[in-house]
Image (cartoon, grey):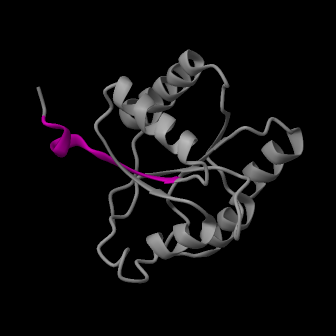
Amino acid sequence: MTSPLDTAFTILLVEDSQVDAHLTKAALEENRFAVDMHHVTDGVEALAFLRRQGESYKEGPRPDLILLDLNMPRMNGREFLGAMKADPNLSDIPVVILTTSDVEQDVVSSYKLGAAGYITKPVDLEQFIHAINQLGNYWFKLVRVPPHA
């Protein structure tokens, strides 16, 4: 079997809820996906991470995928997505919205801003683990992502 370090898929989770961040990490582990997950709590931190700004992020890896919550303090998911997709150095990183919102306008605006997918977080733990399994099978096994620049 291949070592997780040989096949790790780098994820940036942008999520202000520590509980939801823990559940996402646990669901990825439960599904045995080889991921290197980094977690920030809002759009301001996420942009700093992606741009390698500040001591904490100067060695940060470029993620293969960003999982983004919409409703966060300081810079929400919509504002972050707009800023990220407007940056030519970052715009090719796929972003999947992972949020509690099932409001149609949030779905529409997320895709207009450049989201690659939109998942409404199930409240049931088993359904959440299953949703992360489906997400992982698609992004980590089926889809081909561009190599890092």
User: Residue, x 40% and y 48% (percent of image)?
Assistant: 145
Q: Nearer the viewer, residue 83 or 54?
A: 54
User: Residue, x 88% and y 45% (percent of image)?
Assistant: 105
Task: Pinpoint residue 54: horizontal percent, then vertical percent.
Answer: 41, 83
Q: Nearer the viewer, residue 55 or 104?
A: 55
* Looking at the image, residue 23 lies above or below residue 107: above
User: Residue, x 71% and y 64% (percent of image)?
Assistant: 73
Quadrant location of the C terminus?
bottom left
Task: Pinpoint residue 96: horizontal percent, then vertical percent.
Answer: 59, 45
Task: Pinpoint residue 142: horizontal percent, then vertical percent.
Answer: 41, 30
* Looking at the image, residue 62 lies above or below residue 126: below
Could you say which quadrant of the image residue 81 lies in? bottom right
Q: Residue furthest top?
A: 126
Quadrant location of the N terminus?
top left
Q: Nearer the viewer, residue 1 or 72?
A: 72
Could you say which quadrant of the image residue 84 lies in? bottom right
Query: Is residue 61 toward the left or the right of residue 126 in the image?
Result: left
Q: Which residues are magenta?
A: 3-13
Task: Pinpoint residue 83: horizontal percent, then vertical percent.
Answer: 66, 72
Query: Is residue 110 toward the left or the right of residue 89 in the image?
Result: right
Could you say which quadrant of the image residue 120 lies in? top right
User: Residue, x 59% and y 18% (percent of image)?
Assistant: 127
